[in-house]
Amino acid sequence: MRVLHVISALYSGGAENMLLKLLSQPSDDESSAAVISLAGGGLPYKRIQALGVPVFSAGMRLGVPTPAAFWRLAAHARRIQPTLIQGWMYHGNVAAEFASAFLRGRVPVLWNVRHSLYDLKYEKWLTARVIRLGALLSKRPARILYNSAISAEQHEAIGYRADHRVVIPNGFDTELFAPSQEARRQLRDELGLPQTARLVGLIARFHEMKGHETFLRAAAMISSKYPDVHFLLAGFGVEETNEDLMELIHTLCPGNRVHVLGIRSDTPIVTAALDIASSSSWFGEAFSNAIGEAMSCGVCCVVTDVGESAQLVADSGRVVQPRDPAAMASAWRSLLDLSEEERAKLGARGRERIIKEFSIERVASLYQSLYRGISESY
């Protein structure tokens, strides 16, 4: 079995990192994998190559398809000659269907939808058109994978084929993302903070859907009462050179309490150093990798009720409505006012849940079983 993964891009993001984790797992058969990224990529691109997995780029620029990009996609697919194609994200799913048309024989195509869909008006013009196109083409793939049952229902409501649905959650490396007192010490030293400082963090790329404004407004609401609490932002585009972000920080939460870290290669250390991890998304989030990783580290979480976040956190954290900074600030206060022992118990409950239900080993086995079953039926 030769599995070709076609993904929109390989920059830092949830889908890209899930693909990386999946390819990092040993296979229990002699299957092989290759990856085509429509638009190139960054660190995940290099890390997948380091695994020995062939990675190719179709050279698409700014997400705009061109004849040259389609030609490169088809040429790479013919060279790889996969026995199964797995699309990732909307553009990657449509591109996977296109690539299959240039292969010998009948090659099954699977889609992988990684996004919740609350209203198409929130999406970019081209993305909204691709989502609609996906509904029209959804009879073609052998299966449509979702990482969230809520996302599946939302897409089926606009026409995605319901009887092709398979829900496989995100998986997490519970050995890499684990509680660490050393990580707490290390990051506070790096930031020049006392070891007693408490950190509330948002690890997410800079995008409207991620709700950085909600996070910062909530931070401003609790800053005066909790002078030992600092706020940490990390992710793609979360940099001091980002003028929009820095204006938000200076306007909503001035002072030196917000720390901007950008993309980090040591995410397990940053995550394990937190006292509270947050997801302030108000649309788009399907199954938060950052929250699952924080839970795996034994960190308490406050999340907005978007996608699968409430179901993921369950009774190990707090859930608030999106775009409500006062509710988020109140949830933070409820955790900050707990004793360290009480927070540790909540964190341990979350880690136990990730180990039991969402380990990468378990999730990878679900993918492998699905691939084998589809391949054997064609």
Image (tube, rainbow, N blue to C red):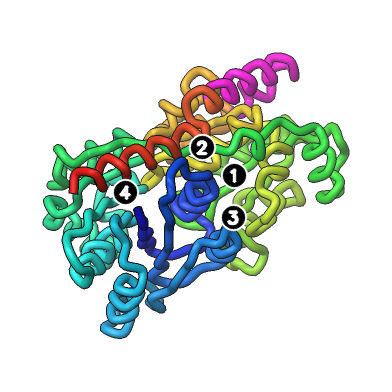
- Of 265 and 34, nearer the camera is 34
Percent of width and height locating residue 36: 40, 67
Q: Main secondary structure of the magenta part?
A: helix
Mark 1 packing: few (<14 Cα in 10 Å), some, or many (20+)? many
Location of mark 3 (residue): 235
- Of 115 and 282, nearer the camera is 115
Q: Earlier in the sequence, mark 3 or mark 1?
A: 1
Magenta residues (range): 332-353
Q: Amino acid at mark 2?
A: Ile
Element type where label 2 sits in the image:
helix
Q: Earlier in the sequence, mark 4 or mark 1?
A: 4
Closer mark to the observer between disc 3 and disc 2: 2
Camera sees residue 165:
yes
- Residue at point 13% right, 47% down? 159
Q: Is residue 283 left or right of residue 194?
A: left
Location of mark 4 (residue): 113
Q: Are marks 3 and 2 in contact (CB under 8 Å)?
A: no
Location of mark 1 (residue): 202
Percent of width and height locating residue 284: 37, 47
Q: CA distance from mark 4 to mark 1?
A: 23 Å
Q: Earlier in the sequence, mark 3 or mark 2?
A: 3
Q: CA distance from mark 4 to mark 3?
A: 22 Å
- Residue at point 14% right, 38% down? 163
